[in-house]
Amino acid sequence: MLNIVIFGAPGSGKGTQSERIVAKYGVNHISTGDVLRAQIKAGTELGMTAKGYIDQGQLLPDELIIDILAQTLDGFKDSKGVIFDGFPRTIAQAEALKKMLAERGQEVSIMLDLDVPEDELMTRLIKRGQESGRADDNEETIKKRLVVYHSQTSPLIDWYKNDGKYQHINGLGTMEGIFAEIAEAIDKI
Ligand code: AMP
């Protein structure tokens, strides 16, 4: 089982690189952000709750997102493994993931930290907002998301270092070059 946590600040390229990992390694993909956006589009109650947090650049409560993750995970049958994209984002979520996988006789194989300088993140996200119309890719919300990343999510770097799963990836450069570094790290597991 190849269980990969793809990690990084908003705009670090997690979604783009996840697609390539899925294509090469045949793992399932869970993007909690994509799940929530689909719920918003479908107009569900969960979607309405999620929208309030997403528009403010804030994280959803841990219990809610952990529940969504467990349900998605249980939906995968005959899986070769999973790429977790946008989850975990807090220490509580990382602990829940560890427990959830352990209950299934599995563990996180590697945590890939896509490291991109802050000015580049801002440039990429503003461009993505113009191209995709994603509501939270505007300057004000991006700034809030980066604050949340630094305060609530970046402590996971040390958490995964302590867990022996951490792998730094230089997130600057061509998509192909970044993917080559990712594939090299995965192939060494
Ligand atoms: P993303 O597409 O991963 O950038 O996520 C977009 C937004 O969805 C985030 O800014 C949060 O509001 C919410 N979200 C996504 N994943 C999580 C998570 N693991 N925990 C809490 N909130 C999340």
Image: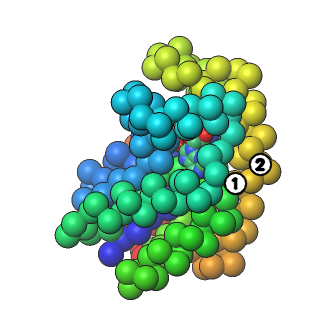
Which residue type does callout 1 highlight?
Thr
Check mark 1 vs ligand 1: CB closer than 8 Å? yes or no: no
Residue bearing mark 2: 150
Q: Quadrant of the C terminus?
A: bottom left
Mark 2 in CB contact with mark 1 (< 8 angstroms): yes
**Quarter where residue 52 is shown:** top right
Q: Is residue 170 above or below residue 56?
A: below
Q: Element type at marker 2? A: helix
Image spot of residue 172 (x, y percent): 58, 41
Measured from the top left, where is residue 96 in percent x and y? Answer: 56, 70
Kind of residue at badge 2: His
Image point (51%, 23%), residue name: 134
Q: Nearer the viewer, residue 62 or 129?
A: 62
Q: Indicate the secondary structure of the residue bearing disc 1.
A: helix
Figure colour scheme:
rainbow
| In this rendering, position of residue 153 left or right of residue 83 | right
Q: Which residue is under mark 1?
A: 153
Q: Quadrant of ligand 1?
A: top right
Distance Cα–Cα, label 2 vs label 1: 6 Å
Q: Residues within 10 Å of mark 1 (few under 14, many from 20)?
A: many
Residue at point 64% right, 24% down? 123
Residue in view at x 38 percent, y 85 percent: 105
* Coordinates of residue 170 in the picture (x, y in percent): 59, 51
For this view, does 82 lie left or right of residue 130?
Answer: left
